[in-house]
Image (cartoon, helix red, strand yellow):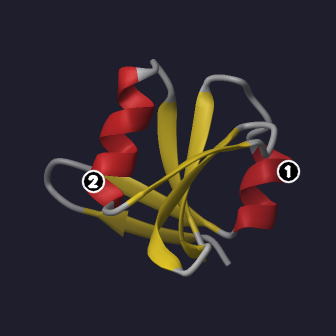
Amino acid sequence: MTNYIFTEEHALISYTREEAFKAFNHERLAYVVAETVEGAPGFSIYSGVGEHLGHLDTRDIAFATALQYDMHALSVH
């Protein structure tokens, strides 16, 4: 299910992982997913083609990391 959240500064669209990979298969997009990897809760970053790029402690750090690599991050669940 796609969720839309609007604030004065941002418009956020939240996709399921399946929706995101089908709709936005692009090398410059990154997907941030809350998940546990090897027992460590956090936020994983996936490339637009589904490759796991990393796992970080917070959502903000995951988005900042994607931006440092010139990728546009989307939140998926």
Q: What residue is disc 2 on?
A: 60
- Disc 1 packing (10 Å; few <14; some 14–19; many ≥20): few
Quarter-of-image position of residue 17: bottom right
Q: Of helix, strand and loop, which one carries label 1?
A: helix
Is residue 53 left or right of 11 when viewed as pictured? right
Mark 1 or 2, closer to the camera: 2
| Amino acid type at image mark 2 | Asp
Image point 74% across, 28% down: which residue?
26
Residue 15's place in the image compared with 61, above or below, is below
Looking at this rendering, what residue extends furthest in the top direction? Answer: 70
| Amino acid type at image mark 1 | Lys
Position of the C terminus, as image quadrant, is bottom right
- Disc 2 packing (10 Å; few <14; some 14–19; many ≥20): few
Q: Which is nearer the eye, 51 or 76?
A: 51
Is residue 16 left or right of 9 when viewed as pictured? right
Q: Of helix, strand and loop, which one carries label 2?
A: helix
Query: How far across and down, in percent of the image, does residue 31 sit?
Result: 59, 49
Image point 68% across, 78% down: which residue?
1
Residue 30 marker? none
Query: How far across and down, in percent of the image, does residue 24 sit?
Result: 74, 40
Sequence-first disc among 1 and 2:
1
Query: How far across and down, in percent of the image, does residue 19 sit?
Result: 77, 61
Image point 45% across, 77% down: which residue?
41
Q: Distance between the residues labelled 1 and 2?
A: 25 Å
Looking at this rendering, what residue extends furthest in the front direction? Answer: 38
Q: What residue is disc 1 on?
A: 22
